[in-house]
Image: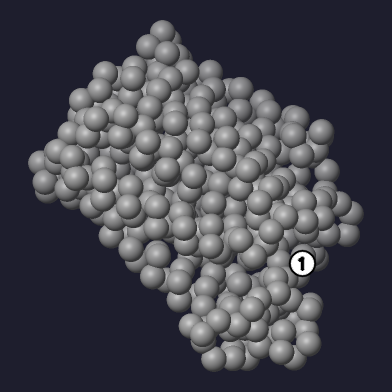
């Protein structure tokens, strides 16, 4: 019951995060803006989300998941109520900013709750199940939201979902409970800074950051903003069909999450090969998709299903955080890792909007911005993977206990004296 109540807050957050995916064309007319200004809504929301991840980790380590999740649903509800009534562009930006803060408080809180209530072996599976369950909110933000907007209109649709979300704070307060003794006491600024530095100094945390950076941003950028306009204007499919195709990004995540979670939970050595394999598959998929001036719908559907696996694969980052950090700083380290994918999302969404503005509506050229971010992330992930392997191999040679036992390869770096986990 505790886990389920918490996961429903994440479902609400994912729904509110993705509402512009199908409401974007309506927002252009309502606020009288162009593609670059439209992308600013998502960039602001995701940028705030990314900036809030380390503070959220510190907050949840200090106050626990129950209080932080309650604050999250209140902010989500109020932000959506404000968005329902906004008629000017600045007011719309303010509303999306409030939504971004509420959204930022959810996922790290849930992961810390999972880390304290489930074993390390169960963690990866439960974390991916949490993401898959939350992703249903993304499904609700596609064709169901399209139907609701068509019947109720902008104002009443967002007033309804905002009010329901804010009312859910009563459930989080009454049902969600933290494990006694897992929250930290009050800390001064120096202690907080040392905690962040301690988490960042662990090679496994750095690897988690870049793994999350590379796996999350493509499905996020498409589902949050650019997927629907690309399908309608770039591919030429009807709006109703575009909503269904866009939902493949979420359905793939829901279906793939438990599978990936079960594999990485049972076979930890497979985690990084899965990440690197996904990054390679993502790159090849872009080559195929962008080779068409107007790709067939079957090719687009196949590509979206490949992209959708980025959500489940990104859970590897949180499994790395759980293994390489003490429980007292898991929230902080999870926040650091979670910055990765969402900062990449903000960067890529803005880049596509700017290129689209300059290219005069050419989605084939604009989406190359996503490929550029993918190449950067693949390079940095490979760099930190080798460094983590070096640190683990050094620890193995000393006889220390390590999260995953590795075999030395010819391409491994020299021994790395960095600690495998932070000092407890």
Residue at image position (65%, 84%) is 393
Is 364 located above or below residue 84 in the figure? Answer: below
Q: Is residue 124 left or right of residue 388?
A: right
Residue closest to the eye, 49 or 405: 405
Is residue 280 visible to us here?
yes
Q: Residue furthest top?
A: 151
Point out the image quarter for the N terminus: top right
Find residue 297 and report its image quarter: top left
Residue at image position (60%, 61%) is 271
Residue closest to the eye, 229 or 284: 284
Q: Position of residue 161 (x, y in %)?
A: 54, 22
Point out the image quarter for the C terminus: bottom right
Residue closest to the eye, 198 or 285: 285
Classify mark 1: residues with Cα within 10 Å, few (<14), some (14-19) or many (20+).
Answer: some
Coloration mode: one colour
Count of labels shown? 1
Q: Is residue 169 left or right of residue 29?
A: right
- Residue tagged by mark 1? 328
Q: Position of residue 371 (x, y in %)?
A: 29, 55
Is 403 located above or below residue 22 in the figure? Answer: below
Q: Is residue 203 left or right of residue 82?
A: right
């Amino acid at each position: 019951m505790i886990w389920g109540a918490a996961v429903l807050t994440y479902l609400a957050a994912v729904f509110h995060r993705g509402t512009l995916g199908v409401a974007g064309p309506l927002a252009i007319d309502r606020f009288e803006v162009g593609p670059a200004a439209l992308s600013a809504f998502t960039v602001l929301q995701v940028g705030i989300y990314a900036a809030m991840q380390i503070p959220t980790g510190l907050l949840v380590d200090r106050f626990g998941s129950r209080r932080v999740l309650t604050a999250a649903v209140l902010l989500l509800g109020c932000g959506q109520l404000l968005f329902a009534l906004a008629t000017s562009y600045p007011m719309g930006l303010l509303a999306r900013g409030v939504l971004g803060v509420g959204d930022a408080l959810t996922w790290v809180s849930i992961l810390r709750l999972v880390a304290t209530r489930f074993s390390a072996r169960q963690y990866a599976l439960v974390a991916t199940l949490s993401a898959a369950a939350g992703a249903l909110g993304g499904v609700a933000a596609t064709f169901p939201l399209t139907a609701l907007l068509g019947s109720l209109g902008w104002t009443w649709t967002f007033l309804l979902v905002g009010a329901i979300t804010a009312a859910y704070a009563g459930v989080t307060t009454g049902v969600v409970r933290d494990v006694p003794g897992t929250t930290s006491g009050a800390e001064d600024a120096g202690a907080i800074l040392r905690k962040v530095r301690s988490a960042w100094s662990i090679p496994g945390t750095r690897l988690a950051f870049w793994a999350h950076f590379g796996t999350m941003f493509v499905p996020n950028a498409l589902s949050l903003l650019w997927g629907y306009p690309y399908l309608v204007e770039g591919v030429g499919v009807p709006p109703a069909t575009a909503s269904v195709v866009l939902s493949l990004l979420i359905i793939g995540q829901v279906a793939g999450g438990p599978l990936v979670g079960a594999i990485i939970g049972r076979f930890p050595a497979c985690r990084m090969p899965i990440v690197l394999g996904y990054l390679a598959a993502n790159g090849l998929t872009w080559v195929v998709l962008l080779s068409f001036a107007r790709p067939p719908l079957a090719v687009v559907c196949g590509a979206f299903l490949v992209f959708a696996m980025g959500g489940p694969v990104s859970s590897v980052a949180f499994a790395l955080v759980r293994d390489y950090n003490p429980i007292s700083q898991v929230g902080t380290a999870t926040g650091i890792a979670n910055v990765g994918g969402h900062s990449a999302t903000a960067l890529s969404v803005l880049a596509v909007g700017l290129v689209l503005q300059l290219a005069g509506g050419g989605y084939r050229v604009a989406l190359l911005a996503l490929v550029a971010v993918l190449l950067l992330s693949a390079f940095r992930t490979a760099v930190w993977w080798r460094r983590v392997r070096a640190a683990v191999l050094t620890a193995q040679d000393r006889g220390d206990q390590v999260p995953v036992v590795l075999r030395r390869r010819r391409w491994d770096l020299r021994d790395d004296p960095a600690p495998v986990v932070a000092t407890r």
